[in-house]
Image (cartoon, helix red, strand yellow):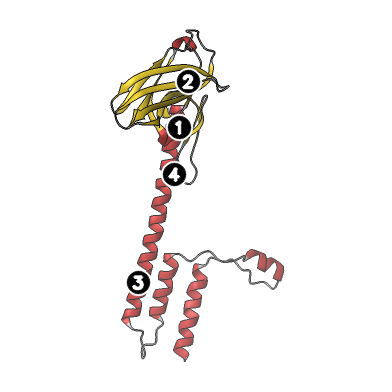
């Protein structure tokens, strides 16, 4: 019983020594309680100190089983590995955020090609180039262009096309041959595939106005002129 009590006292002493509390030994209760406002979290060093204290103060007539010490050492090793892994992941995430910020700053003001049905036409005389995706060969391929009021201003007939990415050019004019006004325009591509009229995906140019960094591992968002916000993963090509 004496040895058990001594062991308990020694373990408590080791625990108190590892917790870094600063309690005053004076009789003033208010100042003493404010100076010892809790203990720090027990880390691997504190647990190891407790294990050594436990081994030093065990009952020599009734020692603990070696398997218990081995099990505790394995737990300490696992704890240390988890703490090291957490530190490594934290460093990796910080590096990822720095890389993402650098990438974002280089995109502002540049032209990108994204999967979208809208595009901003700032200089009608310069026209606009885009592309559409043909999942299979088809007929009656066309691109219809609408202004921001929803009026059809131009139809580009492309006839029959094979499967793949098909490029098209718009000269910035309406069906009457007049230059349109600068602004946002909507593109609707379609084709007859296996006898069925099918909508097609279009890829259009846009200028990056700003970039919103993702939080907690989320994807970066590009804020595009005339289009709005799109995920960085939807970018097909980055221009000059």
Q: Image check: 97 left or right of 35?
A: left
Sequence-wise, the earlier of marks 3 and 4 is: 3
**Pointer 1 with pointer 3, Cβ within 8 A:** no
- Tell me where residue 153 appears, x and y as whole percent: 50, 16
Secondary structure under badge 2? strand
Residue at 35% of width from left, 86% of height from top? 63
| Mark seen at residue 73 | 3
**Where is mark 2, residue-wise?**
145
Instruction: Find the distance from the CA under tag 1 to the CA under tag 3.
Output: 47 Å
Closer to the camera: disc 1 or disc 2?
A: 2
- Name the residue nearer the viewer: 87 or 236: 236
Closer to the camera: disc 3 or disc 4?
A: 4
Instruction: Find the distance from the CA under tag 2 to the CA under tag 3.
Output: 71 Å
**In the rendered image, is residue 7 in sight?**
yes
**Where is mark 1, residue-wise?**
104
Identify the residue at the far top of this view.
Answer: 177
**Pointer 4 with pointer 1, Cβ within 8 A:** no
Mark 4 burial class by Cα count in 10 Å: few <14, some 14-19, many 20+: few
- Tell me where residue 69 appears, x and y as whole percent: 35, 77
**Where is mark 4, residue-wise?**
94
């Amino acid at each position: 019983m004496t040895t058990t009590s001594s062991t308990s006292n020694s373990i408590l002493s080791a625990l108190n020594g590892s917790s870094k509390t600063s309690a005053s030994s004076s009789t003033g209760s208010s100042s003493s309680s404010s100076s010892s406002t809790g203990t720090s979290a027990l880390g691997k060093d504190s647990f190891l100190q407790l294990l050594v204290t436990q081994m030093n103060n065990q009952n020599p007539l009734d020692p603990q089983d070696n398997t218990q010490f081995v099990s505790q050492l394995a737990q300490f090793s696992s704890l240390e590995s988890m703490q090291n892994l957490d530190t490594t992941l934290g460093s990796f995430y910080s590096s990822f955020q720095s890389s993402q910020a650098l990438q974002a700053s280089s995109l502002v003001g540049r032209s990108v090609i994204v999967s979208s049905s809208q595009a901003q036409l700032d200089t009608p005389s310069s026209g606009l180039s885009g592309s559409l995706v043909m999942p299979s060969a088809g007929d009656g391929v066309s691109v219809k262009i609408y202004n921001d009021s929803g009026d059809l201003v131009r139809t580009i007939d492309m006839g029959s096309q094979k499967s793949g990415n098909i490029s098209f050019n718009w000269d910035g004019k309406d069906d009457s041959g007049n230059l349109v006004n600068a602004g946002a325009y909507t593109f609707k591509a379609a084709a007859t595939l296996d006898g069925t009229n099918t909508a097609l995906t279009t890829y259009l140019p846009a200028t990056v106005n700003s970039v919103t960094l993702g939080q907690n591992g989320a994807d970066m968002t590009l804020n595009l002129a005339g289009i709005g916000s799109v995920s960085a993963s939807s970018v097909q090509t980055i221009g000059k």
